[in-house]
Image (spheres, grey):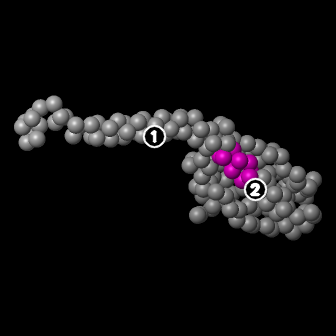
């Protein structure tokens, strides 16, 4: 009995270790839960959400750009000289992108093919051509000017200094 009371050993002295083991097990379970939750989010849900969000931003950007181009072209072709700066987001999903004219369409090209989109321009008949491109890393300037070869106008997408 003496060894139990004075702490020199015996059958009851290992009880001080059980609270430590309990806390270590609780901590292990919490860390395992957090690890599984983080893996699930970053491996599946978050990338899919980022792709969907990037696609939405690309569609809105292209839609707003089409509206600005269409609004800049006057209904008649006499003495046209329009120069406007168009605000574009610098990145979509963290990457730079490009908007280019292809005939009567504007195409938003992005490194992620899921974010790439296009839209058709509704322009008056006196528009001879739409040409050029904008990079999101430079300022976007819209120029509408007389076509020297015809009675129509040319719409140009030009880059400038940001």
Q: Position of residue 58 (x, y in %)?
A: 70, 48
**Magenta residues?**
53-62
- Numbered badge on residue 113: none
On the picture, is 103 further left or further right than 49?
Answer: right
**Disc 1 vs disc 2: which is toward the camera?**
1
Give the structural element (helix, strand or loop) at label 1: helix
On the picture, is 80 further left or further right than 10?
Answer: right
Q: Residue at x 60, y 56 (%)?
A: 90
Which sits in the foreground, 26 or 145?
A: 26
On the picture, is 60 further left or further right than 19?
Answer: right
Which sits in the foreground, 158 or 34?
A: 34
Which sits in the foreground, 51 or 139?
A: 51
> Would you name the residue on which mark 2 appears?
65
Asked if residue 57 lies in the magenta stretch, the reply is yes
> Would you name the residue on which mark 1 appears?
34
Q: Residue furthest front?
A: 1
Pointer 1 local density, CA inside 10 Å: few below 14, some 14–19, many at least 20: few
Q: Is residue 110 visible?
A: no
Between discs 1 and 2, the one toward the N terminus:
1
Q: Residue at x 16, y 30 (%)?
A: 11
Using the rendered view, name the quadrant where residue 102 is placed: top right
Q: Residue at x 61, y 44 (%)?
A: 50
Q: CA distance from mark 1 to mark 2?
A: 43 Å
Pointer 2 local density, CA inside 10 Å: few below 14, some 14–19, many at least 20: many
Asked if residue 144 lies in the magenta stretch, the reply is no
Q: Is residue 132 above or below residue 68?
A: above
């Amino acid at each position: 009995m003496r060894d139990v009371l004075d702490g020199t050993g015996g059958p009851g002295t290992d009880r001080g270790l059980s609270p430590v083991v309990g806390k270590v097990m609780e901590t292990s379970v919490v860390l395992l839960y957090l690890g599984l939750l983080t893996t699930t989010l970053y491996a599946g849900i978050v990338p899919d959400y980022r792709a969907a969000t990037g696609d939405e931003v690309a569609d809105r950007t292209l839609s707003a750009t089409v509206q600005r181009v269409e609004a800049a072209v006057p209904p008649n072709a006499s003495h046209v000289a329009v120069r406007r700066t168009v605000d574009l987001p610098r990145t979509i999903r963290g990457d730079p992108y490009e908007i280019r004219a292809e005939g009567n369409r504007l195409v938003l090209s992005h490194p992620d093919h899921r974010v790439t989109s296009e839209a058709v321009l509704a322009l008056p008949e006196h528009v001879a051509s739409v040409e050029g491109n904008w990079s999101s890393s430079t300022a976007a300037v819209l120029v509408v000017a007389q076509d020297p070869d015809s009675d129509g106008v040319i719409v140009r997408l030009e880059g400038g200094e940001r």
